[in-house]
Image (tube, grey):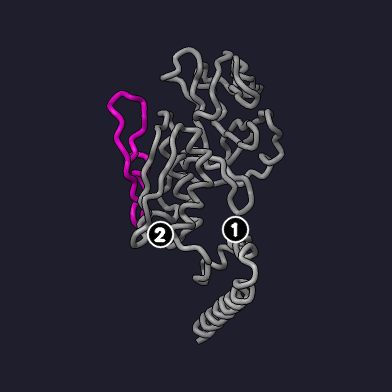
Amino acid sequence: MARERAEQLVREVVELYGAGLQRVLDIIGDRDDDLVERLAADELVASLLLVNGLHPHDVETRVASALDSVRPYLGSHGGDVELLGVVDGVVRLRLTGSCQSCPSSAVTLELAVKDAVLAAAPETVDIEVVGATPAAGSGLIAAESLFSHVHPNGLDGSSGTGTWVSVPELEELTPGEVAGFSVAGLPILVCRIGEQLFAYRDRCAACTHSLAGATLQRKAGGQVGDAVLRCPSCRAHFDPRRAGLRLDGDADAETLSPLPVLVRDGVVSVAVPAAEVA
């Protein structure tokens, strides 16, 4: 009896919050469209609106906005994503461009896209990817393998591919700065180029030594902000914007291992594959 009463009280409180939010939207909706957009853009308020079915944007608009938020990271892998539509809770995407092959590309890209879609549209139940399969030996990741772990009822983070860890200290990095951090027991290297943050496992793909002490340098003949990352041990050069692709030596075989960096709930976070979590 006590449990039933408690559940009833919870339902009544939720309904009260929902009615209150509806009243707020009704009051400001016809007077200040800009304010409604600001409320929808706030992650905390947006989550309350979603829970109560009051979000002003439909699911397709929210998914499109979520994909926009991860495009800088996808671009660092030489790729992009196009939203084809959302039908019966199924998000249909087309991958464009290409992703350089590296030990963690498939997992980290999946984490970035899946998390963004789930946060913006928790009512979605599946992600369907349409894309061409690269030729054998091309060194590219097939579209179907990229989301091989995403399936119905698999958008709740239960696939075991990894976890997001808040690292607010990354916000303190200034443009051109490189620093090392330990995230969930995993040593990582993070650099900031302009407004963008790029994170990698702290291991040089060429000499296997730590990247501690690595620096950003301007490419020969490049513009300001067109930086490359140099290993302090072997002096190999890598392109932070292209998933850590090596720019000298055996570039096809030596690529840094990137980790997604996104702002989640207002805090900079890094996605760490499950196998790396201490």
Q: Is residue 7 left or right of residue 130?
A: right
Query: Which residue is more in the foreground, 229 or 88?
Result: 88
Query: Which residue is more in the foreground, 26 or 123?
Result: 26
How would you rate the neighbour count of disc 1 (Cα within 10 Å): few for under 14, some for 14-19, many for 20 or more?
few
Q: Is residue 206 left or right of residue 221?
A: left
Residue at figure coordinates x 54%, y 24% from the top left: 239
Give the vertical position of 207 relative to 22 (above or below). above
Give the SS element for disc 2: loop
Residue identifier under label 2: 124
Q: Which mark is residue 213?
A: none
Amino acid on which the number 1 mark rests in the picture: Ala
Amino acid on which the number 2 mark rests in the picture: Thr
Estimate the x, y position of residue 236 in percent, counting from the top left.
55, 15
Q: Secondary structure of the magenta portion, mostly?
A: loop
N-term mark: 1 or 2? 1
Q: Is residue 74 left or right of residue 232?
A: left
Residue at figure coordinates x 38%, y 40% from the top left: 95
**Residue 205 shows in the view:** yes
Estimate the x, y position of residue 81 in percent, counting from the top left.
42, 42
Give the vertical position of 69 relative to 218 (above or below). below
Span highlighted in magenta in the image: 126-152
Using the rendered view, name the quadrant where residue 110 is placed.
top left
Residue identifier under label 1: 41
Estimate the x, y position of residue 126 in percent, counting from the top left.
36, 55
Give the SS element for disc 1: helix
